Amino acid sequence: MPDIYKTIASKSEGTYTELRSKFLAFAYPVGTVEEAMSRVEQYQRKYYDARHVCWAYMIGAEREVFRANDNGEPSGTAGKPILGQINSNDLTNIIILVVRYFGGVKLGTSGLIVAYRTAAAEAIAAAEIVTKTVDEEKTFSFEYPLMSAVMKVVRDMDARIVSQSYDGNCLLTVSIRRSHMPELEKRIGLAISPF
């Protein structure tokens, strides 16, 4: 399973105009389907006067959770081209919404596809693309005299301390990139019980 993925750092926007129809694109980093759908609701309320609010999202490092919506446009002319831009940029944990204000002239199927694809591409082009890791957490329990040996492993492996407590036994919860967890477990195991 992959433990690294590309997403956007923060909200970005793009626009595209064709035959007086205006397409406003908004991209957001999201971590869950619920978060993505709350953005959809937010934009449908905010742009209630727009003809269409079309969108697509991709969630998870494995890029297996995705959905596209044409919101009344002809099937496959809006959500799919937006999702296509997410895919062609290898992004995940992202939603792109494109708001269309109708300009009075019909664009036709191919015109719509180009418009939604271009608006989504503009929002991605304006975004700062970042690479993130999929991290795992694990809690280790050990006696206080072993603290310095355990902390040395945590520092050497660049793990992040999530929480720690020292009541009786020490409890240390650390977070590290998924592919590095087996090595961390092995090294802390050796530090805790070297024999």
Image: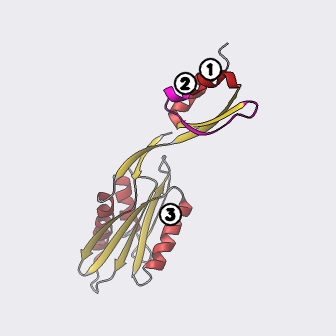
Q: Nearer the viewer, mark 2 or mark 3?
A: 2
Q: Residue at x 48, y 40 (%)?
A: 3
Crowding around mark 2 (Cα neighbors within 10 Å: few <14, some 14 to 19, many 20+) is few
Q: Which mark is residue 191?
A: 1
Query: In the image, is residue 53 above or below residue 149?
Result: below
> Disc 1 versus disc 2: distance between alpha carbons?
9 Å
Q: Which mark is residue 165?
A: none
> On the picture, is 60 further left or further right than 51?
right
Which residue position holds label 3? 36
Residue 160 picture location, percent across and down: 53, 37
Residue 129 picture location, percent across and down: 35, 51
Query: In the image, is residue 107 above or below residue 39?
Result: below
Q: Secondary structure at mark 3?
A: helix
Which residue position holds label 2? 152
Q: Nearer the viewer, mark 1 or mark 2?
A: 2
Query: In the image, is residue 1 above or below residue 102?
Result: above
Of mark 1 and mark 2, the one earlier in the sequence is: 2
Q: Which amino acid type corresponds to the residue marked 2 in the rendered image?
A: Lys
Marks 1 and 2 close (CB-CB < 8 Å): yes
Identity of the residue furthest to the right in this view: 168
> On the picture, is 114 further left or further right than 192?
left
Region rendered in magenta: 153-169
> Disc 1 versus disc 3: distance between alpha carbons?
43 Å
Q: Secondary structure at mark 2?
A: helix
